[in-house]
Image (tube, coloured by chain):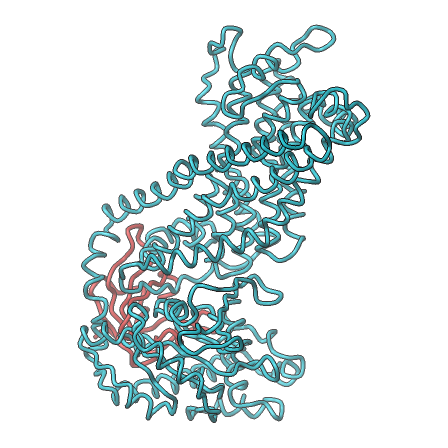
Amino acid sequence: MPEPLSRLRVADAGVVTAVEGEGSMSVRLLEMGFVPGTRVEVVKIAPLGDPLELRVRGYHVSLRRAEAAKVVVKRA
Amino acid sequence: MIAVAGNPNVGKTSLFNVLTGSRHQVGNYSGVTVERVEGRLAARFGGNETTTLIDLPGMYSLTACSEDEAVAFRTLAATGDAAPDGVLLVLDASNLARNLYLAMQVLEQGAPCVVALNMADVATAAGLPADPDALSRELGVPVVVTNARTGEGAQAIADALRTLVADRPRIVAVGGDAFARVSEAMPPATSQARARWLVTTAAAGQLELASAVEQDALRPIDADTWAQAARELIVARYAEVDRLLQIVGHVEELVDKAPAMTASQRIDVVLTHRLFGILVFVGVMGLIFISIFAWADPVMGLIEDGMGAVSELVSDALGPGLLTELLTDGVIAGVGNVVVFVPQIALLFLFLGLLDDSGYLARAAFLLDRVMSRLGLHGRAFIPLLSGYACAIPAIMGTRTISSVKDRIVTILMIPFMSCSARLPIYALIIGALFVDRDGESSGVDRGLVLLGMYLLSTVSALVMGFIYKRTILRSPTPPLVLELPPYRMPRLSNTLLMTYDRVKDFLRSAGTMILAMTIVLWAVLSFPREDTGAGQGGPTVVANSYGGRAAQSLEPVLAPIGQDWRVGVGIIGSFAAREVLVSTMGLVYGLEADDDDPVQLREAMRDAKNDDGTPRYTPLSGLALMVFFVYACQCMSTLAVVRRETRTWRWPIFMFVSMTSIAYVAALLVFQVGRALGYG
């Protein structure tokens, strides 16, 4: 069942099904490689509980939970 | 002109340095605050006077989400005379899965292009093959394997740049209804590259960056359609990237594991650990702070001593007179006022460069984002703000790492509230003079506590002002994080030194001349008219009769309500050169030789000074009011000169000066009047 990426825990992985919303944030997420069909893994959560460290398309990127919530994934 | 483009952290600037050597010009792109660095292709690669390279800001995409990207697109897509002769696109061979996306956009533009496949050694070690021939065949442009660390491939790049061939734009086919619909709505004669840029830029809510004709044609399209069209376009580009990855042999399972990050993840076990990570962070920040605050001090002392020695030589050689004073108190002091900042600027940029190069700066932002985003700022604002405690000048220059213009200006406006090291001699003078009794013993108020109070006041004020600016005149949403955590790499000292050298040179040229001019003006204000020259060099009478002295005397009605007299007023005017000059200017007023570090006589003179009616001229309350004034007042022309350099307009330095002086006056007024009403002083 698809769910927001922000709900995944450390070491969980999923496949992007969509990036929700309009505006610069969703364009940016898509251009950074969060296109449907891409595998994403949660690597770490920052000490203060936010942001997340994610692995996508062969690199690591940090997103805030609010930003990660726009990415919809299906757990792998 | 050759534009050098690439993602951040791919060795783009290193390669630029290899190709151009050490002579760079640092400036700004016209009309914006984005830094522009250009250099000439070095002679050893067969460069001549005409081959200029521009190091574009690092970017993931040409879509104008930030000013950096807007500038990069404008440079790459410029037409006519401004059009680039070619593009050097630097790709990280160990992360083609993301890097090739920018390549798709750049190749759409159709400018002749050469690809540098950098870090091929890292890629090979990580098990990702680097196949320049296959990539060259597929992209239709020359691909050269480079290693910016060793200089490998630089000659081949230079050769390829010299034989650039005009190319047709490489356009990736896009299927999808929304994309087709918005493409039809484009004004006639819109190039495909332009149309694609408009799609993602409009979807990002930045349609105002388009031309008037384009805006008119595209305004009817709703946000939903833009979003859908942009999605179709981006998905199509990434599909093409995936196809290329297959061809060069980057299989999906391998890419998914991010092999280039394996070693970095082991380091991050410590560096972003919930306990050790924060300890290391505090240690690193402490080191930066101590170095700017303390290590720079001996060098600054040497510079001051050196300037003093030169002054003495000049006055010995010329004898007393107006010219001597102009040279010593105006020109030489002015040069000193400029050069004295160099150690702190150099140290801050050295640290910023090494931290950025190594990949740690991104981790620091990762650790701190939760706190900084509450303020509405990016994690990158932290180091500049912290540096503000040492000196606002390097701190304000350090805000260049913040990409959002509004957030950068918010940070610049916050920095001068931080109690910098130049305020310390003022606090020390006042606390030493007025918060002690006759024998120099404590007068019941803990002096350390008063000092701590000033630092707390300045910190809280900076945060509150930032909060206010962010929500009023510089209102903008909290900047997105979307922060790459690049692989750790051994930082390269030579690159950082070169970067630091470029910034220092730029400071001396642009802000330095302004500071020098202001010092001379200030000297004139406190030295003319010279009706009574009999008092000798800079004697008390000259100062009192000077324009500055007279201004301060006529300002007494304004100074009295905050507990000050005209003598302090002269000091405030003099301290505009640099806050600590208050001490020596006050010394002049009292006809004393006042040492900045330990002005014993001046402390005593201030403590003993009486009004005509025999009451003490200065009280602890008036001293407190003066310190509060200095917490807030922007008594530093160098800060204003640097703000002008960084924002490229006089608007912000004027706003900063007027607002901070007003706040300072009101705060000092409150302290003095409320204190008096409560029976103190």
Residue at the far right in the pictured view: B531
Q: Tell me if residue B288 comes above or below residue B489 in the rendering.
A: above
Q: Residue at x 67, y 47 (%)?
A: B654
Residue at left 70%, top 6%? Answer: B614
Q: Is residue B499 left or right of residue B153?
A: right
Chain A, chosen colour in render: red
Q: Quadrant of the N terminus of chain A?
A: bottom left
Who is closer to the viewer here, B10 or B658? B10
Along the viewing direction, whichever of B449 and B500 lies nearer the viewer: B500
In the image, residue B2 above or below residue B267: below
Q: On the rendered structure, is B78 left or right of A25?
A: right
Q: Position of residue B137 (x, y in %)?
A: 33, 93
Nearer to the camera, B244 or B426: B426
Q: Which chain is cyan?
A: B
Left or right: B446, with A65 as reference point: right
Image spot of residue A68 (x, y percent)? 35, 66
Quadrant location, the C terminus of chain A: bottom left
Q: Is residue B665 visible?
A: no
Residue at position x 34%, y 70% in the image: B10
On the rendered structure, is A13 left or right of B315? left
Q: Is residue B408 visible?
A: yes
